[in-house]
Image: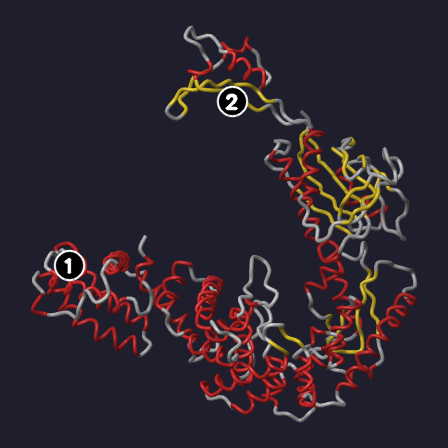
Amino acid sequence: MSSASLLVELFVEELPPKVLNKLGQAFAGQLFEQLKAQGLTAAGSRVTPYASPRRLAAHITDVADRAANQPLRHKLMPVSVGLNAQGQPTPALVKKLHAIGASEADAPRLKRAPDGKTEALFLDTVAAGATLQAGLQKALHEAIAKLPIPKVMTYQLEQGTPLPGWDSVQFVRPAHGLVALHGAAVVPVTALGLTAGRATHGHRFEAQSDPITLMEADSYAPTLRGQGAVIASFEERRAAIVSQLKTAATQAGQGLCAIEDEALLDEVTALVERPNVLVCRFEPEFLQVPQECLILTMKANQKYFPLLDAQGKLTHQFLVVSNITPADPGAVIQGNERVVRPRLADAKFFYDQDRKKTLASRVASLDKVVYHNQLGTQGERTARVRAIARAISEELGVATQQADQAAMLAKADLLTDMVGEFPELQGVMGRTYALHDGLHEAVADAIEDHYKPRFAGDALPRGPVGVAVALADKLETLVGMFGIGNLPTGEKDPFALRRHALGVIRMLVEKALPLDLPPLLQAAAQAFGTLLPDAALSNAQLLAFIDERALGYLQGRGYSAQEAEAVLAAHPPWRDLPKALDALRAFAALPEAPALAAANKRIGNILKKTEAGQDAPVQVALLREPTEKDLYAAMQRVLPQADAQFAAGGYSACLQTLAALRTPVDAFFDSVLVNAEDPGLRANRHGLLRQLHQAMNRVADLSRLAQ
């Protein structure tokens, strides 16, 4: 066996830029894993993915031309079936031997071994290792089949195929070339109607020669860079763009920097083969338009990087990542400046037109916009959000009039030209137009912030009015959708109910709001009137749904699933969740914690088996055993102190105080028969345990700490 580097490249038409990096990683990763599974890679083999607009490739080190032979044990059949009374092979055994490529002559090599309750026959053979050609063919087929392709194309094969013009193949984009090199040798595999060779192609306009002949696998990236003017590595191109953006921004002016946008950076990296960053400009008068509009149109439509000054304010300069490097870049710069100008002019026109009408004058038109066929129009939805926002603001002591006004105007910008052209600006333009209309800044902020948090890690509303309206908006969506049975399924969540639930949780916890969910959901349901006849049932489902999201949220903040489940089971106020979790973690570190958690679990199991009303308040006269008297006395000393600490919000102190009950609790269970035959005695002991159980589980369900 000999070992060398392996290079596989698929040369295709321009790949979807937003998924290029994922495709490249998946292609290389699958090839490597498939070859490794067949024993064709060495222990120290490494894979390097390559992905450019027109190619997916993988370079794998230390790949053998043939895998080592592997011992193989075949289980044949029970001895009683395979051998007759004289110990000779039966026809069934002979047939089985032939099926695995052996014969009756191999019968003496059969081995007997236990197999469950019977004894079976086994044959040890040696499986020949896969050849690189066969192994790579299988790996290539699997890698292509498992690519995370967003949308498959069907296209006809080129000339040279058995039925040109008739044979067709499916792939993300039409493929035109396949390279497979093991060291300097071509591996004759096929894929997508192509046969592997050593020829590839470079940059469309700047390659020194075309096609390019690759002499060996290890020369792939250097050859493409030198002869083909292509940086094949996605990560190298990305790093080159980042470096050039910084350099160009510095050259454009002191203190300037390109806007940071990881998604845009990835997309631009996927659009060029050899990046060249250039500085362009537009007319300063366009800066009268809110910078969010200009930034969005430059990023979304043109893939440009706007330049910001040291204060984060947009300048009239932007950076272009070009795919060509001419000696005189003037024509490229002028072309991009000419292209962006109409976009900016459109934004300015929309902005000027929108300001001719107030937000308040647009509210009536929301009655003409359908929100959901079962829940009415956006106008009806706005009325519900207003009612919920008023209830929340009154509960929080927030300016109710401002919350009501913000809720009324929150969706009005959906009817503006700017948001119609750029839906991503909803809320942002609402704030801008509200300030233009002379509204209070708190109202304007709330109009923008009622969408927050828009995604994981997004900022929360900046003010109390915004919090009230954001909560109202999300609760209206959640209660309404659950009320009509429109629940998320699998990956489908068209109304972003998971995100809304997480937003509600984050506001309740991180803003430390003195609100509880059941009353909030009830207030939201009342706003729907008779639209939700089974609101009580759907709200119960919604509460469970929010608890599930809370579990993930708390784990994301560093708490274990066990800790989160224990605290959520006790239903403390949402604003106290972090404090309760920290108290539980401190309690779990105490030496008394394991014993008390186990006792708590035992108590819970006992009480589950008692019927309602079977246990009564503790009667001191019925305390018979010394240890139950000791436990009762200890509870009389400890529980009032723990109650006071719990009421004052001292959760950690409360749990540590309860830890003093470990010794009397252990002694009680060691010597007392809880389920005594005497009904009165049994009920009294149940009552004692119920009182203890309630006291111990107010911060968290301690039984969930038991192993």
Residue that appears at 54% across and 11% down: 106
Quarter assignment of residue 588: bottom left
Residue under circle 1?
668
**As drawn, which residue projects farthest toward the top?**
86
Crowd class of label 2 (few under 14; some 14 to 19; many from 20; radius 10 Å): few
Instruction: State the image quarter where residue 128 is shown.
Output: top right
Disc 1, disc 2: CB below 8 Å? Answer: no
Q: Position of residue 418 (x, y in %)?
A: 75, 79
**Which of the labelled discs sits on residue 138, or is there none?**
none
Q: Is residue 239 visible?
A: no
Secondary structure of the residue carrying numbered label 2? strand
Against 511, residue 361 (above or below) is below
Residue type for callout 1 = Phe
Question: Can residue 211 be seen?
Answer: yes
Q: Which mark is residue 73?
A: 2
Q: Position of residue 383 (x, y in %)?
A: 58, 84
Residue 311 pos. (x, y %) = 68, 80
What amino acid type should be assigned to the residue bearing mark 2? Arg
Q: In this rendering, would 688 be left or right of 33?
A: left
Q: Nearer the viewer, residue 584 or 46?
A: 584
Pick the front one: 526 or 605: 526
Of the two numbered discs 1 and 2 on the same chain, state the one appearing first in sequence: 2
CA distance for labels 1 and 2 = 59 Å
What's the coloring here?
A: secondary structure
Q: Nearer the viewer, residue 613 or 114?
A: 613
Q: Residue at x 24, y 56 (%)?
A: 602
Q: Residue at x 80, y 78 (%)?
A: 316
